[in-house]
Amino acid sequence: MSEIIAEYLVNTLGDKISAEMIAFIISMLPILELRGGLIAAKLMNIDFFKAFAICYIGNMLPIPFILMFIRKIFNILKKLPKVEEIINKLEARSLRKADGVKKYRLLGLLIFVGIPLPGTGAWTGALVADLLDIRIKHSFPVIALGVFIAGIIISILSYGLLGLIGF
């Protein structure tokens, strides 16, 4: 799914803005995040190290804001009749996915963010950290490390890094 959306955005935006900016924007988006950004960067033939840095920064940029403001935003949105149900479902779904985070706290959060599976990543990790009252000073560095680990895993898959280093 990430591949399809990333490819669509590359094709749609490719003649309007730079390849680096496309990878950066894709990396900032929920669901796509660094995974989608690296896939898009590979499609646009951006050098690996440049792509990794751009996508990592793009993925991490929204995280402090999510950690600081998501609960306040959700509380405001819950005052809207039809939106409250959506927000409650989103919170419940996020917490259901985060059993390991509940049990192992920071290690669980690291694994949750660092293993690139559907429904995991920095955005959901930040939401889960906030819902579990994990302080920003603890959750942000763990999420940052998790995004780095996920980036390495995705790089191996999308850039064929194993082939580049002789495996």
Image: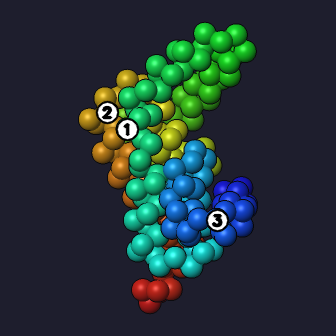
The span from disc 2 to disc 1 (Cα, nearest Å) is: 8 Å
- Residue 36 placed where, x, y %? 59, 59
Q: Toward which corner of the image does residue 143 lie, by quadrant?
A: top left
Name the quadrant of the N terminus.
Answer: bottom right
- Residue 14 placed where, x, y %? 65, 68
**Is residue 68 something one can see in this rendering?**
yes
Tell which tag, 3 or 1, sits nearer the viewer: 3
Give the residue at x 57% y 79%. 45
Q: Secondary structure at mark 3?
A: loop
Q: Amino acid at mark 1?
A: Pro
User: Pointer 3: what residue?
Assistant: 16
The span from disc 3 to disc 1 (Cα, nearest Å) is: 29 Å
Q: Amino acid at mark 2?
A: Ile
Q: Toward which corner of the image does residue 79 lie, by quadrant?
A: top right
User: Pointer 1: what residue?
Assistant: 64
Q: Earlier in the sequence, mark 2 or mark 1?
A: 1
User: Pointer 2: what residue?
Assistant: 136
Give the residue at x 47% y 22%. 71
**Is residue 38 something one can see in this rendering?**
no
Q: Amino acid at mark 3?
A: Lys
- Does 157 appear above or below 139? below
Q: Are marks 2 and 1 in contact (CB under 8 Å)?
A: yes
- Does 56 appear above or below 68? below
Q: Secondary structure at mark 1?
A: helix
User: As drawn, is 158 to the left or to the right of 129?
Assistant: right
- Residue 51 placed where, x, y %? 47, 70
- Residue 126 placed where, x, y %? 44, 36
Crowd around label 1: few <14 · some 14–19 · many ≥20 (10 Å): some
Looking at this view, name the residue that lies furthest to the left: 137
